[in-house]
Amino acid sequence: MERTEETNPQVKQAKPRGRPRSFDRATALEKAILAFWEHGYEATSVSDLTRVMGIGAPSLYAAFGDKRALFEEVVLEYGRRYGSFGDRALAEEPTARAAVERMLREAAVEYTAPGRPHGCLVIHAATNCTSAEVEESLRDRRNANIAAFESRIRADIAAGELPADTDAAALARHAGAMIQGMSQQARDGASREELEALAEIAMAIWPRT
């Protein structure tokens, strides 16, 4: 007797693996970016996230993991979408001076862009944060930026673009302090033009050969 497909135990019907996702992940992630950017890590609750992302808690956990895992993805995506101007300046400009000047001028534009929170997520998201891991992660990112500035400055000293007695570490920290200060000023309502004026003053202290 021949076995039909229905009686053959080796023939199995494919079963759906859970319910299909009913939301656009990229759109939900963008909304999470804006929420953390506006309110910081600590002040943004899971219920806040589900409300702005338009999804339930089970969907959030299934798609992104817990709040901290979502925040880590948010920081990475923020860097790609909004925070890459500094890396581009360092990679594309021929000198540290040109790179930092471009970075500060572009920060004045980016930090005051309409239609989204002002300032920098990486600088402000750890405000009043009780998670040591989140705070350390963001601090490491900020310190990595300062280290990148210092590396470019030291390269320019070696190439003769800056005086040999230039304090590379101090000049790099000055650039970092300006970026962080401009971010806070933008949060406090400073305009693009006001931040551009700060950038011009900041570059005036750079040593010349």
Image: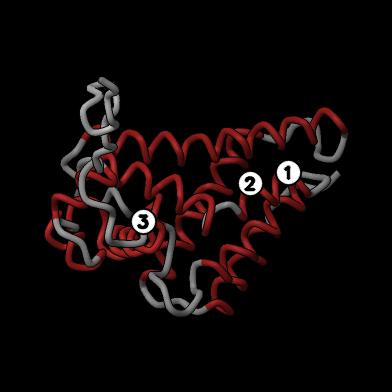
From what the image shows, is residue 57 above or below residue 209? below
Comparing 17 with 181, the one in front is 17
**In the rendered view, does 166 fall on the left or right side of 87?**
right
Q: Residue 135, labelled with which disc?
A: none
Reading the image, the residue beneath label 1 is 91
Task: Name the element at disc 1.
Answer: helix
Q: Earlier in the sequence, mark 1 or mark 3?
A: 3
Q: Residue at x 29, y 23 (%)?
A: 2
| Residue at left offset 43%, top offset 58% | 120
The C terminus appears in which quarter of the rendering? top right
Residue at x 25% of width, y 24% of height: 8
Q: Amino acid at mark 3?
A: Arg
Q: Which residue is mark 2?
A: 87
Residue 181 percent location from the top left of the image: 45, 59
Task: Indicate the amino acid at tag 2.
Answer: Asp
Spot occupied by residue 93 in the image (x, y as percentages of width and height): 79, 49
Residue at 16%, 41% (x, y): give it.
130
- Label 2: state its secondary structure: helix
Q: In the drawing, does residue 73 fall left or right of residue 168?
A: left
In the rendered structure, are the residues bearing label 2 and label 1 in contact, judged by CB atoms less than 8 Å apart? yes
Q: Which residue is mark 3?
A: 25
